[in-house]
Image (tube, coloured by chain):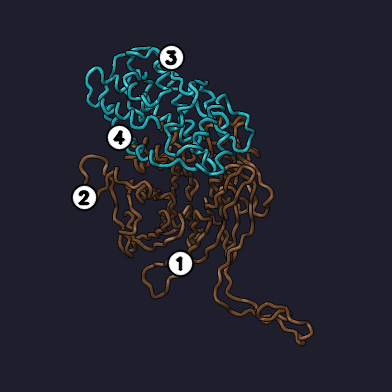
Chain colours: A brown, B cyan
Amino acid sequence: MFFHLDFFHLVRTTDIISTVEFNHTGELLATGDKGGRVVIFQREQESKNQIHRRGEYNVYSTFQSHEPEFDYLKSLEIEEKINKIRWLPQQNAAYFLLSTNDKTVKLWKVSERDKRPEGYNLKDEEGRLRDPATITTLRVPVLRPMDLMVEATPRRVFANAHTYHINSISVNSDYETYMSADDLRINLWNFEITNQSFNIVDIKPANMEELTEVITAAEFHPHHCNTFVYSSSKGTIRLCDMRASALCDRHTKFFEEPEDPSNRSFFSEIISSISDVKFSHSGRYIMTRDYLTVKVWDLNMENRPIETYQVHDYLRSKLCSLYENDCIFDKFECVWNGSDSVIMTGSYNNFFRMFDRNTKRDVTLEASRENSKPRAILKPRKVCVGGKRRKDEISVDSLDFSKKILHTAWHPSENIIAVAATNNLYIFQDKVN
Amino acid sequence: MFTRGLKRKCVGHEEDMEGALSGLKTVSSYSLQRQSLLDMSLVKLQLCHMLVEPNLCRSVLIANTVRQIQEEMTQDGTWRAVTPQVAGRAPLDRLVSTEILCRSAWEQEGARPAPGLGDGHVQGPVSDLCPVTLAQVPRHPQSGIWELDGPQENRGGFHKSLDQIFETLETKNPGCMEELFSDVDSPYYDLDTVLTGMVGGARPGPCEGLEGLAPATPGPSSSCKSDLGELDHVVEILVET
């Protein structure tokens, strides 16, 4: 069995999407964009009349999470672009999410209001104060239904803790703390406390001239609240245990694959830089994405990954021009499906790739409006590497490097995926026969 | 970039060469490509400091690349052994294909104005930067590049040439990248260590261009000297050497 996706839903946003994330039930899908906005989609409840389990995702809430700021001290602008969104598990009727730009993390509460109190004593229907002299009776206000309103309110602002650009946030499994990571430091926060955070990793050298490595991504273990990992620009992953010491500068485990000498070039280090790291849902594995591959590591084996998947190896001979046009620095993300059996990541030309870990089969699909008609099944794509190009294949030199899929998300339990292609959000669902 | 167009011609002619010379041409092509990569990296480092706020990860990766090239070029400068040329044909093909790709991309770059010019913020972050030099000890190839928040005393010895560069950037047309380095002090392009004793030197192993690392001895650039005519300053150094 392999994955047959059919096109489901396309949403056009006004700005480039910079992050996509399902919540823990998959009922909500959040996107953040370059303009600092967050848009949340909610899955429609399936009607009893529908045979297929197809709930559409409709806009649920839109709000401006971050605004552009100016750092007067350094004379630099702080972008409002949302780098990451992470949901908190739902604990009451409201939804909570963390959103972050380069410098500031915010906790947002998204809640519904479908009733409003009417019949105040001291205020009239428009909210104006009544003249006390006119009040002759006392009554208890009652709640009456109103049109559903979804409100987003910022509940916490976690600011001024990062000198460098925040690249990751991760909610801890204790649901009380979370971490934020920038290029050189990782801070631990308590959700209730905004004026203080603990620094748990600091790789800034005393002499900045000696800086050769930065933190690229970080994530908490899904079950063990004392464990987290962070990846580096040198292609290494460190697993840290917060019980060992307050400052986790010494790792508990160090994951690095020995370099392949036959593939060595001036670009080796750049393409080994890890752009994303994700724990499997089971907590047993971690997945890393570097420029050309996706790797799966077993937490129990540090000296090499257990699986390596080639995303677009045909780019290996193009590294010089990809360096020249800066594409080599693109940071692709990677995701697991709910059962950790399939992994997905993006590529260029609006292609994205899926790898089935069990069958070892892989597929290349395209998120484009041309071949996205409702209920049409996505056709696998193929890149022609050399020699004769077949009819449906696309040659490497025809790839559009401005169309990159950096952000994707997978529903936690179903085969529904969200793919962000510039300012288009595609939602695909597995075709259920 | 001063390398634009000129080195292309040099490499293009290599396709017609055969025999014993092909190894030598591969070597010189490798060193030219390596130099091109170095120059491109330096420009990137400078440009990224003119943007809103430099992406630290990107800057670190580029600087590490520069350091690698530097180290290799420094090693080559002291390396003397002469061994017969080995399999030059396959790597040569790879060289050419890389070259072609770089060429088309670079021709576009020439038309692209450098970002951030005319922007009032250029001065601030830019003054922290020190260009990488070959003459300086490779251990500290860049000083003060990362200091976004720290003191600015780590400027190193090339403050003067740095100011010249950015004066050029501020006053001149964005398209004149070639002139960027024409005013730079000679030590910036001191290729002495690279070029001494290189006449007739062959490289030891397969050279795969920039895609493959080899402790290659760069051949003399004299065959391409005439093509570097526009680069007054560098040519002077070569001739003097």
Q: Could one spot residue A70 in this view of the protein?
A: yes
Three-letter residue code for mark 3: Thr
Disc 4 crowd rating (10 Å Cα; few below 14, some 14-19, many 20+) is some
Marks 1 and 3: in contact by CB < 8 Å?
Answer: no
Label 2's element? Answer: loop
Pointer 2 indicates a residue of which chain? A
Pointer 4 indicates a residue of which chain? B
Residues under labels 3 and 1: Cα distance?
A: 67 Å
Read off the residue under disc 4.
Answer: B100
Which corner quadrant holds the N terminus of chain A? Answer: bottom left
Read off the residue under disc 1.
Answer: A58
The correct choice, above or below, for A75 with respect to B153 in the image is: below
Pointer 1 indicates a residue of which chain? A
Q: Could one spot residue A307 in this view of the protein?
A: no
Residues under labels 4 and 1: Cα distance?
A: 47 Å
Label 1's element? Answer: strand
Disc 3 crowd rating (10 Å Cα; few below 14, some 14-19, many 20+) is some
Q: Do pointers 2 and 4 mark residues of a single chain?
A: no
Read off the residue under disc 2.
Answer: A391
Three-letter residue code for mark 1: Asn
Read off the residue under disc 3.
Answer: B78
Pointer 3 indicates a residue of which chain? B
Three-letter residue code for mark 4: Ile
The correct choice, above or below, for A313 with respect to A343 in the image is: above
Q: Which of marks 1 and 2 is nearer the N terminus?
A: 1
Label 4's element? Answer: helix
Which corner quadrant holds the C terminus of chain A? Answer: bottom left
Q: Which quadrant would residue B27 be assigned to in this image?
A: top left
Q: Do pointers 1 and 2 mark residues of a single chain?
A: yes
Residues under labels 1 and 2: Cα distance?
A: 37 Å
